[in-house]
Image (cartoon, rainbow, N blue to C red):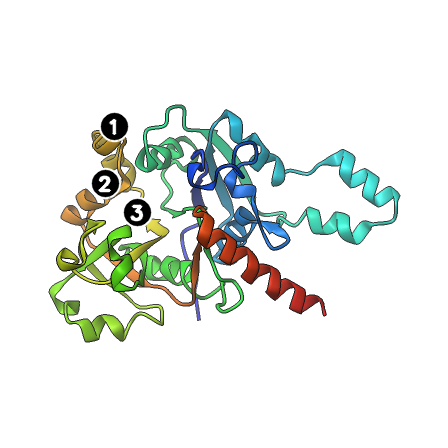
Amino acid sequence: MIGPNNITHAVIPVAGFGTRMLPLSKSVPKELLPLGNRPAIHYVVEEAIAAGIKHIVLVGHAQKSAIENYFDINAELDNQLRHKGKDELADSLNWLPDDVTVSMIRQGKPLGLGHAVLAARPIIGEHDFAVLLPDVVLDPYTTDMSVDNLAFMINAFANDGHSQILVESVSDEDVHKYGIAQLSQAFSDASDIDDNTNSNSSFKVAGFVEKPSLADAPSNLAVVGRYVFSNQIFDYLAQTTASVGGEIQLTDAIDALISESAVNVTTMRGDSYDAGDMRSYMQAFIYFAERQLADDK
């Protein structure tokens, strides 16, 4: 059972142009592309709320205002629906709980994921917080979002104060696509890893290797796109200089955090979908649509 936690803020970076999703993302933000009957980001925000998040900070740019509008109330549409007696439909569109706030702040310059997270600092303030990458959608049908994955990470952080990074086991041929966890000596044996890849378990990480070859990979545990950070990460991000592609890398700040304090990885329960990759997105759309059609029968 998940107990009280002290993480109530989350950052969702939505400033990317979604070039992997062209031409779909030419005029529609990739985060609003549908998975079944809801946009992808809807599931990500639902996941955050189920885990206890009360304030969600979207980090975007001028062309992403449609995302902020999605979480706002369209008074004209609401009035039209209710005038036509479609109160149930109107209520379903205004689904955010009253105690949840969604804010948006602009990144300003496209300087990478680390810079996007740092851009949320004026709103996050001194709070510890979660980060959810909107390209990654976790399967809500096979897990309990109020207990598993992000919720588990938040509870683990509340218990030991260690920042948490979600990882999942990937096949050998996919290792080169991801940041791969280098585990501490206590979990360096492959059997220890395998025992923890279908349940939420949290244990210390020694570092990460970005997109290694299979021969150089320290494990098969890939970063999924869910983080729970001590507020201290902001200081490391502020000190991080631009590296690959002139961008401020979140992984560089994580490495600095690991060198000064303990950071844990949490093995993921269930499945995840890359909604920012065309092939994976189409597979996810079919899966979500089939589940929803089955539920409507």
Residue 101 sits above or below residue 247 on the image: below
Asked which secondary structure carries label 3, the reply is loop
Q: Are marks 3 and 1 in contact (CB under 8 Å)?
A: no
Location of the C terminus (image quadrant): bottom right
Q: Any mark on residue 230, and which?
A: 3
The residue identified by callout 1 is: 246
Residue 251 sits above or below residue 163 on the image: above
Q: Any mark on residue 253, and which?
A: 2
Q: Does residue 24 appear to the left or right of 2 in the view shown? A: right
Percent position of residue 221, x then y: 26, 61
67 or 152, nearer to the observer: 67
Looking at the picture, which amino acid does disc 3 mark?
Answer: Ser
Residue at left offset 37%, top offset 34% = 116
Q: CA distance from mark 3 to mark 2?
A: 12 Å
Asked which secondary structure carries label 2, the reply is helix
Other-residue count near label 3 (Cα within 10 Å), few / some / many at <14 / 14–19 / ≥20: many
- Asked if residue 177 shows in the view, the reply is yes
Location of the N terminus (image quadrant): bottom left
Could you say which quadrant of the image residue 267 lies in? bottom left
Mark closer to the chain start, 3 or 2: 3
Percent position of residue 294, x then y: 65, 69
Percent position of residue 167, x then y: 31, 59
Q: CA distance from mark 3 to mark 1?
A: 25 Å
- Asked if residue 178 shows in the view, the reply is no
72 or 181, nearer to the observer: 181
Percent position of residue 3, x then y: 43, 65
Looking at the picture, which amino acid does disc 1 mark?
Answer: Gly
60 or 5, nearer to the observer: 60
